[in-house]
Image: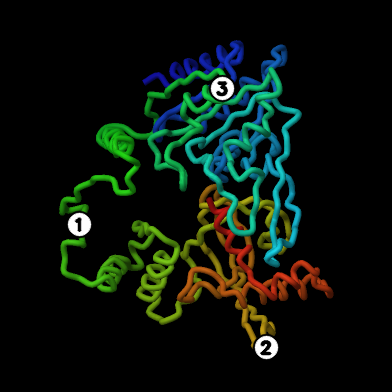
Amino acid sequence: MDNEKFEKEALQVVENFLKSNTQVLIVSGRAGSGKSTLAGKIYELVNKNNESEYSQAQILSPTGQSVGLIKQNFPQIPEQDCQTIYRKIYRRATKNIDDGDNLIFDFKLNKQEDKNVFIIDDASYISDEENNRGNLHFGSGKLLTDLLTSTQIFEKGNVKIIFIGDEYRLLPIRDTSAKALKQTYFEELGLNTMKYELKTQYRMHGELARGIDKYAELITSVENHQKIIPYEFKNTGNVRNIDEADWSKEEKKQKIAGQFNRDNKRNKVVVTYSTRAAQEYNKLIRRKLQNVEDAPISNGDLVVFSKNQYDLLVMNDASNEFNEDFFTGDIAEIIATYDRKTSNVRVNNQDVTLSYIKVKYRLERTGKEYVSYLLENVLNSDDSQLSSDERTALFYDAEERMGITETPEEHRRHIKSNNEYWEAAVKKLAN
């Protein structure tokens, strides 16, 4: 298979698009078709074409994982030219108190003035459903609408957008279709649009590739956007339908957790529907592997970043501090544990204990190693998040460590009412 030939063909389509009157190009392709690589190649193509009016490119993505992958494969792309959509198109939040005494973070839309070619990777994840919920308000609440508005494609005559994604993936949350990959969606907005499909499979071959194709078609063939995909499990050497056994829900969990041991724990994974279920399995598996009721963080454990963390302050082995970006879904392996610290904070007339552990971890995406403190309170909790008092204690503890002696009025008022903005931030930024 001549990979270079197919790559040249795709880039030629892009070059023709840039020379045409068409405003939007949709590039679709299934898993392993080279979409993220193409995004970086398009950036290079646009920025080399200095004689064209379309010579200033920007890569954006709804997911930090995509941004991280492109940065890894194309380290020469400047930081400001490859970012998540949220970080680029929304301004720093202003904080207000609404009539219900709730703290509201309002992210106003930021218009892009210096770029005219926008390359949008992982476009299948972009929803256009109203998404302003809880205490975070982002622009109009519709991400795709805000993205188009931010690029000024409706006002300017020299703006082009390239959406790259897999229309066979599961749909964005609360949306009935991946609108960013639908030609009719943009044409109904009055935008001239063309579409191109990447058909070459670079990553998977043989039976695996055929299986991917089969189930991609199955996903798109489900009528009326049902939540359940018609799939018949068959008991084989590799697949077992435990629903056929006469076990209780708790017995099923115990059977699944029982499949793990120290020798194979990195070769197995449990995928759950909810964070709470994942927390339950983690507790069961850790209890089995370490043979203690409340198993502490230990070498070999994996931790997952649940939201994008920009310029997070971390350390190296020499305790030198520096800033680093981490993205939703990033996985890190604990390779060393050090001292533990506890802080007792008085909240609502009772003591709340926060437990921190200093750890060294290796990021799987880059192989780089860092040293940080992890908060252990959730690890052996029955819940998958901090309690309201623990979140308040965390805020007060941070104030004390930073030497802040006066709590801002908006926080003082909010702490008396509720802490829902914290969950809202985690849920929103973890998407």
Three-letter code for the amino acid on which mark 3 is drawn: Val
Q: Is the residue under label 2 in contact with that under label 1 (CB below 8 Å)? A: no
Q: Is residue 326 left or right of residue 99?
A: left
> Residue placed at 55% from the left, 18% from the top?
192
Q: Callout 3 environment at 10 Å: few (<14), some (14 to 19), or many (20+)?
A: many
Q: Which of marks 3 and 1 is nearer the N terminus?
A: 3
Quarter that holds the N terminus? top left
- Count of numbered badges drawn on the protein: 3
Q: Callout 1 environment at 10 Å: few (<14), some (14 to 19), or many (20+)?
A: few
Three-letter code for the amino acid on which mark 1 is drawn: Arg
Name of the residue lying farthest toward the front: 99
Q: Callout 2 environment at 10 Å: few (<14), some (14 to 19), or many (20+)?
A: few
> Residue placed at 51% from the left, 61% from the top?
303
- Can you identify the residue that label 3 sits on? 24
Observer-nearest residue: 393 or 184? 184
- Mark linked to residue 349: 2
Q: Is the residue under label 1 in contact with that under label 3 (CB below 8 Å)? A: no
Three-letter code for the amino acid on which mark 2 is drawn: Asn
Q: Residue 226: name its quadrant.
A: top left
Q: Which structural element holds mark 2?
A: loop
| Disc 1 from disc 2: Cα separation | 52 Å
**Could you tell me residue 350's position as x and y percent?**
64, 88
- Can you identify the residue that label 1 sits on? 240
Q: Is residue 77 left or right of residue 427?
A: right
Q: Which structural element holds mark 3?
A: strand
Q: Residue 410: name its quadrant.
A: bottom right
Q: In this view, does 289 lie to the left or right of 132?
A: left
**Could you tell me residue 92's position as x and y percent?**
74, 49
In the image, residue 37 sits, relative to residue 300, either above or below, namely: above
> Residue placed at 59% from the left, 56% from the top?
369
